Amino acid sequence: MTFIRLQVKALLDRNAVLFAGLIFLGMGLFGAVQGSSPGHGGLTLWLQLEGMLCLYGVIVTELAKPALIRDKQTKRLEFLLANGLPLKYLVRGYLVSLYLASLILWLPSLLFEGLQAFNHSMGSEFLLMIMILFIQSFLITWGLVNAILSRENLGRLNAIQYQTVLVNGILAGLSLAISHLQSMVEYYLVTKLLLLIGVGLWLKRRRTVEGIVRSYY
């Protein structure tokens, strides 16, 4: 718990708060434009929420740069492992700290979108989708931590932000294509969750202590 608390405190610095403020300002401007346009159907809300999930991917990868990525590049992870810290506890600490810090920065945008949804009498649908988004965002964070730890070429971590957004977009496209065949939102949700779990498990299998030690530029 001490490790997690220190990580969250270090992640939520002034630059992170400023970054979240700029994001919230952009969401406010987009919401104003969206509110002035006619219609606010379920499809529009789903597209906004998928966009917010991509936004979460940007936030969590930005926070991972001064934390997990830097610790791996400076060999701090090797030091912690060499001093007897089990890999699973290390993964758990980075996962929880990144997820909590990202949620704190992501929360204002979620609240803003929730107000927009309630103003358009879509509160119940929005609450259901928010719960799904919390689960998906956790799976994205889990996959990101496994991806960083399993990456032996540290130079390729510079593009991890774009890769995270791209993978989420590909999974969303595949889920949308499958759900379109059945014309049911439930198929979309289940397919997206299963794909995220599958990618996370695949990355977890590639994550080993030996891979962390063998990392290079």
Image (spheres, rainbow, N blue to C red):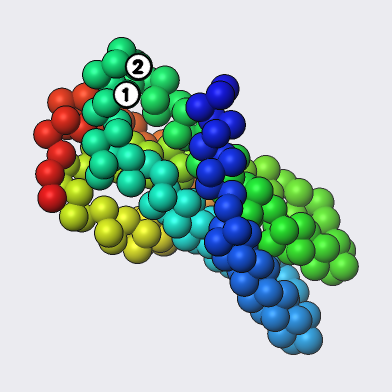
What residue do we see at 57% from left, 65% from top? 19
Nearest the eye: 141 or 216: 216
State whether residue 180 is above or below residue 92. below
State whether residue 75 is above or below residue 184. above
Q: Can residue 177 be seen in this view?
A: no
Q: Where the N terminus falls, by quadrant?
A: top right
Q: To which quarter of the image does residue 87 belong? A: top left
Q: In the visual, does 38 lie left or right of 75?
A: right
State whether residue 26 is above or below residue 154. below
Q: Where is residue 209 in the image (x, y as percent from the top left)?
A: 21, 24
Q: Position of residue 151 (x, y in %)?
A: 21, 42
State whether residue 185 is above or below residue 38. above
- Residue placed under numbered mark 1 in the picture: 80
- Residue placed under numbered mark 2 in the picture: 85
Is disc 2 surrounded by few (<14), some (14 to 19) or many (20+) residues within 10 Å?
few
**Mark 2–mark 1 contact, CB under 8 Å?**
yes
The secondary element bearing badge 1 is classed as: helix
